[in-house]
Amino acid sequence: MKFVDEAYIDIAAGDGGNGCVSFRHEKYKEFGGPNGGDGGRGGHVFAVADSNLNTLVDFRYARRYEAKRGQHGMGSDMFGAAGDDIVLKMPVGTIITDAETGDVLFELLVPGEVITIAKGGDGGFGNLRFKSAINRAPRQKTPGWPGEKRNLKLELKVLADVGLLGMPNAGKSTLITAISNARPRIADYPFTTLHPNLGVVRVGPEQSFVVADLPGLIEGASDGAGLGHLFLRHLQRTRLLLHVIDMAPFDEGVDPVAQAKAIVGELKKYDAELFEKPRWLVLNKLDMVPQDERAAKVKDFVKRLKFKGPVFEISALTREGCESLIKAVYLQVKAQQVSEQPQEEQDPRFLNLPAE
């Protein structure tokens, strides 16, 4: 399925039905009185977060969504039927913004969450509503209210705990294949990955986290070079970034330190908050480095990069070092999840109870 993470749609809720002016006509009932019913409400437009979807491709080709209007009121005290609602299924992580003002209206973050993005108009009143002791034969009615109309921008930011970033062909897709159930395309040419891939990493029973593999970044990505800038937004909701480094590039003239610094610079240019996220170094393809040279090469790389955080030495192909990496990542993600949860307020009556 084609991956689309941005779409523009026009939605219109249904207008309310008009009220009716009608009087009771019956034999021997000379003044039957009013019996005009109200109009029905217009159909609403709902958005539902569907965990089975991971793309906005449906909204790329069908851009107009219009709910039915309410039925008009009728005589004999008959009220109009409500218009049919429209339910739009969207992936979890979709941000709905007003295309004209740019204001964020809604965020779908919980699977099964239902929000009303356009409210249908209320139905108008029939003349039955206006009768009184003074006005026994009212001829007033009100028209239905118009439904809401909006031009919306849909933007998908994948919900992942961990994001993989690095140059093309650094081994990100091989790593996500080694540690999770994701099966992205893997080849020996740049930009094999064309869209984000999500994988669930299972550490143990009821212990897991979600990792996102993005297309490779190159220098100038924040200004539009390559593909990475299109998907950098997907890293904004992650809790941890794993910077994957190719320690055995095919071209011997390539300096991994210069490439790593270039990517860090692109993150800083794109979003300062993204740059401040916890970032760990993952030195990949060490199986291609001779065993006696490995320690010296890793030490020299970290020293030249002036990196202060955790460093992991792995080989995604042979899965060497992957086990310790995913355990450390899980502990970091779990600690952040716990710290983000609001603390439960304790009842002051039970604060100083003696221990049993």
Image (cartoon, rainbow, N blue to C red):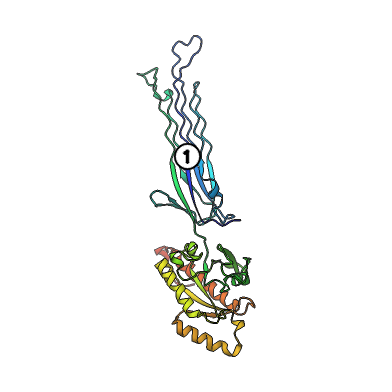
- Callout 1 environment at 10 Å: few (<14), some (14 to 19), or many (20+)? many
Q: Residue at x 45, y 32 (%)?
A: 123
> Quarter-wise, where is residue 261 in the image?
bottom left
List x then y, in percent, for residue 108: 49, 54
List x then y, in percent, for residue 247: 55, 80
List x then y, in percent, for residue 116: 47, 45
Of residues 69 and 115, the one nearer the viewer is 69
List x then y, in percent, for residue 258: 47, 78
Quick check: 193 above or below 170? above
For the residue marked with disc 1, what is the amino acid? Answer: Ala
Task: Classify the position of the N terminus by image quarter.
Answer: bottom right
Of residues 129 and 70, the one nearer the viewer is 70
Quick check: 200 above or below 305? above
Q: Residue at x 43, y 12 (%)?
A: 31
Name the residue at the top extreme: 28
- Tag count in the figure? 1
Label 1: element kind: loop
Tell me if residue 351 can be seen: no
Of residues 152 and 83, the one nearer the viewer is 152
Mark 1, residue position = 13
Q: Residue at x 42, y 35 (%)?
A: 146
Tell me if residue 241 can be seen: yes
